[in-house]
Image (tube, rainbow, N blue to C red):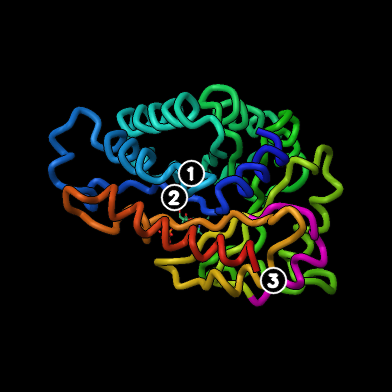
């Protein structure tokens, strides 16, 4: 998917919501556990109930890999279902990959060619030759971890390296990578006060912002600093939406939570 198509979808739905499909068998409604593929059944119902309110879906691959081959099958069924039924939505494989060049190419093939995701999250730690193999794929997007939502972000990411915080070095240096137009960046909603500085370095890039809902990030504050001419934000909520209810009404309850966020986004876009 091109960035222009993503932006058009945001305007049409008046939403820049990304729903995180982080499916934990201990948290989904008990009646689904009798089904052949409980994870896919859960995802399908959530997607069907929310696709008009969200512009992106982000399965975190850890929640699938944890269940071995069965989990990987559920992931494959989920992305195939999304691409077949809702081709307008932007899909993110939250896999946080990155390795030496030839290995990164294989990771990129796994998520872009085999599973046909639009994007994948990538860790910048191994540098240029670990990121560029992902960027080589046309109309696919590499979402680089810049400033993450967790407390451990302060261990390294905000440390001063040659006169500048490390996350700023990541932003600046990555702009020089080949095909850097295919880059987006992860910035945690819990780090909203940093977004103004981040926008000075990457005014035009899309930011994937996880951490609203369960982690306590504030949507209004993120938007105050993060919105740009083409909106430029994808706000992710996982647990806050998909586990709104653990009863038979789980999909309806998820849609209600998604609607709350979409309404706030619509108001922000109109103001
Ligand atoms: O790359 C991510 O998506 C990510 C980066 C980050 O800094 N913080 C963060 O929470 N995430 C992911 O975003 C999701 C957040 O889930 P909730 O806290 O349940 O909304 C999880 O899949 C996390 O792995």
Does label 2 or label 3 sit earlier along the sequence? 2
- Point out residue 200 in the picture as x, y percentages from the top left corner: 82, 67
Q: Quadrant of the N terminus?
A: top right
* Alpha carbon distance from label 3 to label 1: 23 Å
Q: Determine the CA span between mark 2 and mark 3.
A: 23 Å
Please say if the residues under marks 3 and 1 sit with CB atoms less than 8 Å apart: no
Q: Overall secondary structure of the magenta stretch?
A: helix
Q: CA distance from mark 1 to mark 2?
A: 6 Å
Report the magenta residues as a range: 193-207
Q: Does the beta carbon of the residue at mark 2 sit less than 8 Å from ligand 1?
A: yes
Image coordinates of residue 11 in percent, x first then y, are 63, 49
- Going from N to C along the chain, the mark reached first, 1 or 2, is 2
**Outermost residue, front side:** 270
Which residue is pictured at 75% across the width and 66% down the height? Answer: 198
Residue 60, compared with residue 212, is above or below; it is: above
Q: Which mark is residue 57?
A: 1
- Contact (CB < 8 A) between labels 1 and 2? yes
What residue sits 55% from the left and 48% below the top? 13
Question: Which residue in the structure is indicated by mark 3?
Answer: 225
- 197 with respect to 259 (left or right): right
Q: Secondary structure at mark 2?
A: strand
Query: Which residue is denoted by mark 2 in the rendering?
Result: 20
Q: Is residue 237 left or right of residue 101?
A: left
């Amino acid at each position: 998917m091109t960035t222009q198509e993503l932006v058009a979808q945001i305007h049409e739905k008046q939403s820049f919501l990304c729903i995180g499909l982080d499916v934990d068998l201990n948290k989904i409604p008990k009646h689904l556990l009798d089904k052949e593929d409980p994870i896919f059944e859960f995802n399908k119902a959530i997607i069907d109930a929310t696709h008009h309110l969200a512009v992106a879906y982000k399965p975190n691959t850890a929640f699938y890999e944890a269940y071995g081959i069965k989990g990987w099958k559920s992931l494959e069924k989920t992305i195939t279902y999304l691409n077949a039924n809702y081709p307008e939505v932007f899909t993110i494989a939250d896999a946080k990959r990155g390795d030496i060049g030839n290995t990164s190419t294989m990771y990129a093939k796994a998520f872009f060619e085999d599973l046909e995701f639009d994007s994948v999250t990538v860790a910048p730690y191994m540098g240029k030759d670990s990121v560029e193999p992902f960027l080589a794929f046309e109309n696919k997007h590499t979402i680089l971890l810049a400033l993450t939502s967790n407390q451990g972000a302060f261990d390294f990411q905000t440390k001063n390296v040659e006169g500048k915080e490390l996350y700023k070095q990541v932003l600046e240096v990555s702009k020089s990578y080949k095909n850097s137009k295919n880059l987006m960046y992860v910035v945690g909603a819990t780090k909203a006060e940093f977004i103004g500085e981040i926008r000075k370095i990457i005014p035009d890039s899309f930011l994937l912002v996880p951490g609203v809902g369960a982690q306590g990030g504030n949507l209004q504050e993120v938007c105050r600093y993060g919105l740009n001419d083409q909106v430029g934000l994808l706000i992710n909520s996982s647990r806050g939406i998909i586990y709104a209810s653990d009863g038979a009404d789980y999909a309806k309850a998820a849609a209600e939570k998604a609607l709350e966020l979409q309404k706030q986004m619509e108001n922000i876009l109109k103001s």
